[in-house]
Image (spheres, coloured by chain):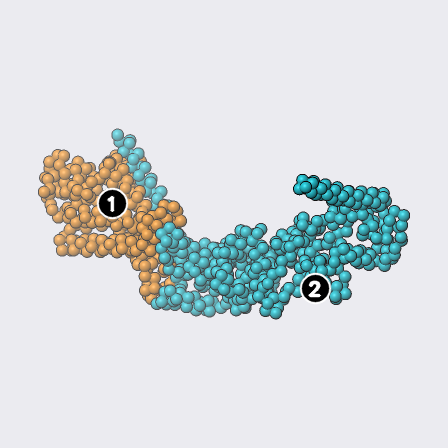
Chain colours: A cyan, B orange
C-alpha cells in the first residue's frame, strides 16, 4: 500500500517534470522560430524606419546580442504586439522620441510601476513624469540587448546611463534644509581632466543596481565625504594633506578647511596649475586679510595688474597639499630657500633687472651662515636654535614691496627698526654694517673694497716670496753639500 | 745651570722659562683660534661642519674662538709689558728691533743663495727672517684683536666707528688670519721643523737650550759677544 503510493507519487513528479520541460522547449522553439522569420530581414543592415520629422532609426537587430539578453526567450511579437509573420503594419511616428515613448509603454506593460518604483534610482523618473517629461526605459536599459539586472553595468556607456537622470535638474536634499543640485553638465565633464573616467570610478558604490540613499546633515558634510573618493587614485597627494595644517584643523573640527574639491572643482575638474589665480581665490575664502595684503604687494600687483606669471602665489611658498604651520622655526628657516627659487634664477630676474646676488650675499653673511648651521645642528643635535633674520624679516611677508620704489631714508628707517628687534641697542650707524646686498666697490663701501683688494694683492706675493725663499735655501744647502 | 760656551758640543741657554711657557701657550691658543676660525671661514666644507657639530654647534665654536682670542690678547699684552719692563728697567738689548742691517742682510743672503756671495750674512741674536716673522705676527695680532673685538661687539663698536667698519673688520680679520696662517704654516714650520739646518725639530724654544755648534753658525755675532763677556744671564732673558 505504502509502496504503491510512493510509486504513484514518483510517476506524478516525473510527469510534471516532463510537462514543464516540454512547455519550456516548446516556448523556446516558438520564439526562435518566430525570431528567425523576423531576422530574415532585421538581421540585415540597411533596414531603416523613417519618421515624419526626417529622423530615422535603423531597424537592425544583432542576433547575438539579442540571444544573450534577458529577453532572449521572448518572441518578437511579445513586445512588438501588432506584428506577426503575415501582419506587418506601417506605423507613423512624428519623431524618434515619440517612437521611443511608445516603446517605453510596452516595457511598462510587464514591468509594473510598483515594481519599478522599488529601485531608488527610478524614484526621480516618476517625479519627472509628473512634470511632463516621459522617462525612456531604453535610454539606460537599451532595447534588444537589455542585460540581466544582477550582472554588472547595464550599458556600455556608463556616463550616458547616469546622465539620463542626472542631466535633469534634481536636488539632493540635506537634513538642514539645504540641498545640492544633482544635474551634471556633460560639456563640463568632457572638458575636464577626468573625461575618460566613468561615473562609478569616483562615485563608487553606485551602479545600475546600487544607488544607495545617503543622508547628510549639511552640504559641507556631503562634500567632505565625497572628496574621500579622490584618494583612491591620488593617494600620494592625500598622504601629503595629512601633514598639512589644514588637515589638522579639520580633524579638530573646523569643517571649513579646504578639501580636494574646493580647489580642484568636482565635475569640472581641471589642471589647476594652468590657472594661477584659482588657488589664491580659494585661500582667500578663509584668509581674506592676507589676500588683501598680498594684492597690494609688489608680487600681488604684478599678478593682478599685469597678469604676471612669474610672481609667487600662496601655494608657491606655503606648498600645495602639505601646507605647514608657517609660524614654526622650521618654516622660518626655509624662507631664503623659497625666495631663492626665483631670486637666484637668472632667467627670471634678468627680465626685471634684478640682481641674483641677493641670496648669495645673504647666505655668506652672518645671518645666512648662522641660519644654515643652525638648521644643520638642529637636525644633527636636535638642538633648539634662536630665530635668525631671513628675507621676510626685512622685506615683509605678504606685504613685500620693492625697495626701489621707496625713498632710501624710509628703507633705512625701517631697517633700523628691524635691527633693533634683535639687537636692542643698535644705533643708526649699526645698520650701515649691513651692505644691503651690494657687493663692496669704490662707490659703495670703499673701505671694505680697499681692504679686500689690498690683501688680495699682497697675499699671493707673500706666498710666492716665502716659497721662493724656502726653495733657494734648500737649493743652496744642496749645492754646498 | 748654563754650560760654559767655550766647551765644544755643549749647549747654550737661549730662552728663559718665561719665553718657553709663552711659546707653548701660543701654540695651544693659536691652534684653537685657527681650528675654530677656519671652520667658520670655510663653513660649507664637510670637515668644518663635522668640527662645528662635534663642538656642539656654531655658538659653541664662536664662544671658544672668543675665549681663545681673549687668552691670545692677554699673551700679547703680557709679552709687550715684559718687553717694555725688560728694555727700560733691566736694560735688555732691543734685539728684535729691525734696523738697516736686516735689509742688507736679506739682500746679502739672496745673493749668497744664487751664488753671488761666498758666505752667508752674519747674524746677531735674531736673523732677518725671524725678525720679519716676529713683526709680521705681532702687527697681525694687533689687527686680529682690533677687528675681532669689532666683530664680537658690533653694536658697541658702531657707537664710535662708522658702520662700514664692521664688514671691513670681517674682511680684514679673515685675510689677516690667512696671512698669519701662511706665515706660521709655511715659513715658521719650515724654519723650525723642515729646514735642513734644524730637521727634525728645532728644540731650542722648548728646552731653552741651543747647541754651541748651531749658535756659532747661526748667530755668530751674539756668540762672539757672549765669548767676550762670558755667559751673561741677561742675554738669554731678552725677548
The crowd level at tag 2 (other Cα within 10 Å; few <14, some 14-19, many 20+) is few
Q: Compare residues A245 and A54 and report the one nearer the observer.
A: A54
Q: Where is residue A115 in the image (x, y as percent from the top left)?
A: 71, 58
Q: Would you name the residue on which mark 1 appears?
A: B130
For residue B192, above or below residue A113:
above
Residue at the extreme top: A481
Q: In this view, does A249 lie to the left or right of A43?
A: left
Q: Quadrant of residue A462?
A: top left
Q: What element carries label 2?
A: loop
Q: Compare residues B165 and A280 and report the one nearer the observer.
A: A280
Q: Compare residues B162 and A339 and report the one nearer the observer.
A: A339
Q: Position of residue B208 (x, y in %)?
A: 16, 43
Q: Compare residues B41 and A183 and report the one nearer the observer.
A: A183
Q: Would you name the residue on which mark 2 appears?
A: A169
For residue A457, above or below residue B114:
below
Identity of the residue drawn at 21% across and 42% down = B123
Amino acid at each position: 500500500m505504502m509502496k504503491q503510493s510512493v510509486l504513484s507519487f514518483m510517476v506524478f513528479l516525473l510527469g510534471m517534470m516532463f510537462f514543464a520541460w516540454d512547455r519550456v522547449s516548446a516556448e523556446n522553439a516558438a520564439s526562435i522560430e518566430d525570431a528567425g522569420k523576423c531576422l530574415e530581414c532585421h538581421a540585415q543592415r540597411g533596414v531603416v524606419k523613417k519618421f515624419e520629422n526626417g529622423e530615422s532609426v535603423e531597424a537592425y537587430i544583432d542576433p547575438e546580442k539579442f540571444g544573450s539578453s534577458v529577453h532572449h526567450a521572448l518572441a518578437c511579437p511579445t513586445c512588438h504586439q501588432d506584428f506577426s509573420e503575415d501582419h506587418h503594419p506601417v506605423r507613423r511616428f512624428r519623431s524618434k522620441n515619440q517612437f521611443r515613448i511608445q516603446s517605453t509603454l510596452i516595457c511598462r506593460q510587464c514591468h509594473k510601476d510598483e515594481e519599478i518604483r522599488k529601485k531608488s534610482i527610478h524614484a526621480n523618473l516618476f517625479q519627472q513624469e509628473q512634470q511632463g517629461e516621459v522617462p525612456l526605459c531604453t535610454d539606460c536599459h537599451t532595447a534588444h540587448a537589455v542585460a540581466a539586472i544582477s550582472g554588472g553595468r547595464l550599458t556600455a556607456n556608463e556616463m550616458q546611463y547616469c546622465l539620463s537622470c542626472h542631466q535633469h535638474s534634481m536636488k539632493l536634499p540635506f537634513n538642514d534644509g539645504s540641498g545640492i543640485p544633482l544635474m551634471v553638465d556633460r560639456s563640463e565633464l568632457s572638458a575636464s581632466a577626468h573625461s575618460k573616467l566613468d561615473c562609478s570610478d569616483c562615485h563608487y558604490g553606485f551602479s545600475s543596481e546600487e544607488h544607495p540613499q545617503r543622508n547628510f546633515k549639511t552640504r559641507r558634510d556631503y562634500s567632505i565625504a565625497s572628496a574621500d573618493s579622490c584618494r583612491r587614485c591620488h593617494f600620494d597627494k592625500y598622504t601629503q594633506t595629512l601633514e598639512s595644517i589644514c588637515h589638522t584643523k579639520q580633524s579638530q573640527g573646523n569643517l571649513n578647511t579646504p578639501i580636494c574639491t574646493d580647489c580642484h572643482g568636482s565635475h569640472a575638474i581641471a589642471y589647476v596649475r594652468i590657472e594661477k589665480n584659482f588657488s589664491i581665490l580659494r585661500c582667500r575664502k578663509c584668509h581674506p586679510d592676507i589676500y588683501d595684503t598680498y594684492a597690494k604687494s609688489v608680487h600681488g600687483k604684478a599678478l593682478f595688474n599685469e597678469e604676471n606669471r612669474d610672481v609667487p602665489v600662496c601655494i608657491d611658498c606655503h606648498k600645495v597639499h602639505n601646507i605647514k604651520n608657517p609660524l614654526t622655526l622650521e618654516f622660518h628657516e626655509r624662507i631664503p630657500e623659497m625666495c631663492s627659487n626665483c631670486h637666484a634664477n637668472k632667467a627670471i630676474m634678468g627680465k626685471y633687472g634684478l640682481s641674483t646676488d641677493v641670496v648669495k650675499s645673504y647666505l655668506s653673511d652672518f645671518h645666512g651662515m648662522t641660519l644654515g648651521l643652525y638648521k644643520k645642528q638642529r637636525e644633527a643635535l636636535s638642538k633648539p636654535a634662536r630665530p635668525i633674520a631671513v628675507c621676510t624679516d626685512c622685506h615683509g611677508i605678504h606685504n613685500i614691496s620693492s625697495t626701489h620704489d621707496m625713498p632710501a631714508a624710509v628703507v633705512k628707517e625701517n631697517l633700523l627698526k628691524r635691527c633693533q628687534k634683535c639687537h636692542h641697542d643698535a644705533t643708526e650707524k649699526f645698520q650701515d654694517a649691513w651692505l644691503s646686498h651690494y657687493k663692496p666697490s669704490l662707490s659703495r663701501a670703499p673701505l671694505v673694497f680697499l681692504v679686500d683688494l689690498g690683501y688680495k694683492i699682497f697675499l699671493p706675493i707673500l706666498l710666492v716670496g716665502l716659497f721662493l725663499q724656502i726653495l733657494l735655501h734648500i737649493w743652496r744647502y744642496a749645492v754646498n753639500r | 745651570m748654563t754650560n760654559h760656551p767655550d766647551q765644544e758640543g755643549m749647549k747654550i741657554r737661549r730662552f728663559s722659562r718665561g719665553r718657553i711657557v709663552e711659546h707653548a701657550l701660543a701654540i695651544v691658543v693659536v691652534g684653537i683660534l685657527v681650528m675654530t676660525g677656519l671652520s667658520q671661514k670655510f663653513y660649507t666644507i664637510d670637515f668644518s661642519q663635522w668640527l662645528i657639530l662635534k663642538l656642539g654647534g656654531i655658538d659653541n665654536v664662536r664662544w671658544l674662538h672668543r675665549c681663545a682670542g681673549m687668552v691670545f690678547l692677554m699673551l700679547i699684552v703680557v709679552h709687550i709689558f715684559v718687553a717694555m719692563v725688560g728694555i727700560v728697567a733691566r736694560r735688555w738689548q732691543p734685539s728684535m728691533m729691525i734696523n738697516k742691517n736686516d735689509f742688507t742682510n736679506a739682500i746679502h743672503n739672496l745673493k749668497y743663495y744664487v751664488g753671488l756671495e761666498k758666505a752667508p750674512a752674519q747674524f746677531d741674536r735674531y736673523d732677518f727672517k725671524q725678525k720679519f716673522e716676529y713683526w709680521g705676527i705681532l702687527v697681525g695680532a694687533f689687527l686680529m684683536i682690533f677687528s675681532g673685538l669689532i666683530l664680537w661687539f658690533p653694536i658697541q663698536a658702531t657707537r664710535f666707528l662708522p658702520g662700514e667698519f664692521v664688514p671691513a673688520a670681517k674682511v680684514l680679520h679673515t685675510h689677516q688670519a690667512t696671512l698669519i696662517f701662511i706665515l706660521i704654516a709655511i715659513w715658521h714650520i719650515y724654519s723650525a721643523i723642515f729646514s735642513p739646518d734644524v730637521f727634525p725639530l728645532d728644540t731650542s724654544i722648548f728646552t731653552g737650550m741651543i747647541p754651541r755648534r748651531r749658535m756659532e753658525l747661526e748667530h755668530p755675532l751674539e756668540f762672539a759677544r757672549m765669548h767676550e763677556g762670558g755667559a751673561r744671564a741677561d742675554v738669554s732673558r731678552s725677548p
